[in-house]
Amino acid sequence: METNVIEIEKRLLSAMMLKNGAAIPLVTTIVEADDFYRPEHRAIFRAITRIYFGGTPPDILAIELELRKSGERVDQRYLFSLIDQEFTTARAEYQARAVKESSNRRKLIQASQGVIDNAQKGVQSPAEIIAAAQKIFDDISRDATSTKRTTFGNFFAKNFDGDVEFAKAYADRRTGFDNLDTEQFFSPGLYVIGATPAAGKTTFCWQLLEQLARRGETCIYCSYEMSRLELFAKSLARELFRRVPSTDLTAADIRRGAWSIQLADARADFAADSIDLSVLELQDETVDDLLTLLKPLCLDKCRAPIVCLDYLQIVPTSRESTRLGIDDSVRKLKNFQRNTNTTFIVISSFNRTNYAHAVSFESFKESGNIEYTADVVWALQLNIMNEIKGLTDISDTRRKIDEAKRRQPRQINLKCLKNRQGTNYDCYFNYHSAHDCFEPCKPFDKIDPSPEKNPSRGERRIENDQL
């Protein structure tokens, strides 16, 4: 524990030196010098805050000079080693809270040991020991909860600038889908995406994460359903389709050892790729197990990662009902997201009773209270659903849906049902399902559910794992 908190302390001090000390007002509302484990870190924290509140940017040379003035000794090499510990202020709040929590744990250990020592000495009565201990524990409790409460005036005096800086750190994030980037500020939060059958929710999310990773983000795909081979084969199929639009090869072919010169070239390019996209293959792990696995991956990065969970309904839970289990999982995911500044994309299934209806919050009805907890709720559907919502003949409805599924490319509508960061919107895509590729497009002027007369061999052989 001590080694871990020392690393977090170093990153926090480094973050406080960035952007002329933009994170300092927020950090100082959470921690003070005595909360740091290492004496050198306490001295550096005091020097940084004295410089900043004295009106000078806290660069490394100013900190060194301030330490000399105060007579506090910190090895120069150690001080300069802090410069490269952190490259963003975006996680300073989480780091400060982690330092504070570690400090309170040490205080609890010390207070508990004091109770044991006093009880063993036998000088004080049990009532006196309990009273003294109660005061100490009350002080620790008050200290621990005070970091969660912010008054109106203090926020604007001390926190506003820092919080804005954190938000600005994500202003340049792009998903790679131009139409989505125009509508959505993709800041850290909990995003839930549901889909009707054949709308391609796994393919969409995997492509989304790959595109984000190619723009420098750290992305982690947590899969309870598909293997890493199935997912990475989707990337090869999509890349091959982009290079050779007439290709017949699908992800299923690639998994079975299909070969072509173009495919070999794409694979060689991918093998030399350094994008930070990884897969966690999961089976029996609960949401607590998952978050335990993710925590060090989040702490190890200067910029919190983007994590996709595929999918919510099959995460094991000990709760007595599926709905309660989902509620519990979503709440824990949201708490983790807030504490780490992670961006979570959670895939959710729909109710079977809503498969033949246009998407709405009713589609998520049996999926817990995700519409209340999520920051953004997306739904993918065949675009034909916008046209058939007034039909009463169920056989005619199903016929039109089946025709739309056979169409290549499929016409897909992404609907934003909830957006805490702005207004709701619609985006449209051509989904080449046989090649695992979503292409942004303009709104469809006229719905044409008729399939092409001569689809490629690949289009005729779409397997369930590509839907």
Image (cartoon, helix red, strand yellow):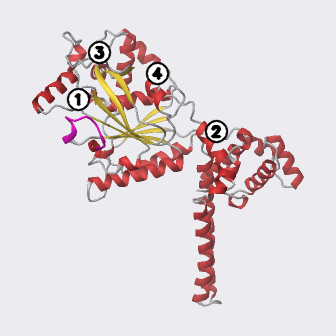
Secondary structure, mark 4, is: helix
Judged by depth in the image, the label closer to the viewer, 2 or 3, is 2
Label 4 to label 3: alpha-carbon separation: 19 Å
Q: Is residue 204 above or below residue 343?
A: above
Looking at the image, do the residues carrying marks 3 and 1 touch, with CB atoms under 8 Å apart? no
Q: Would you call the spot at circle 4 few (<14 residues within 10 Å), some (14-19), or many (20 or more)?
A: few
For label 1, the SS is helix
Q: With 198 as the anchor, is 221 left or right in this view?
A: right
**Discs 4/3, front:** 3
Which of the numbered marks, if any, corresponds to residue 106?
none
Main SS class of the magenta portion in the image:
loop
Residue carrying label 2:
88
Q: Amino acid at mark 4?
A: Ala
Q: Determine the residue positioned at 73% across, 58% down.
A: 33
Q: Earlier in the sequence, mark 4 or mark 2?
A: 2
Q: Tell me where residue 244 appears, x and y as whole percent.
A: 36, 9
| Residue span colored magenta | 353-361
Report the mark closest to the observer, 3 or 1: 1
Q: Whole-Å distance between the Cαs marked 2 and 3?
A: 43 Å
Residue drawn at x 29%, y 48% as measured from the top left: 367
The residues bearing labels 3 and 1 have C-alpha atoms spaced at a distance of 16 Å
Sooner in the amino-acid sequence: mark 4 or mark 3: 3
- Circle 3 packing at 10 Å, graded few (<14), some (14-19), many (20+), is many
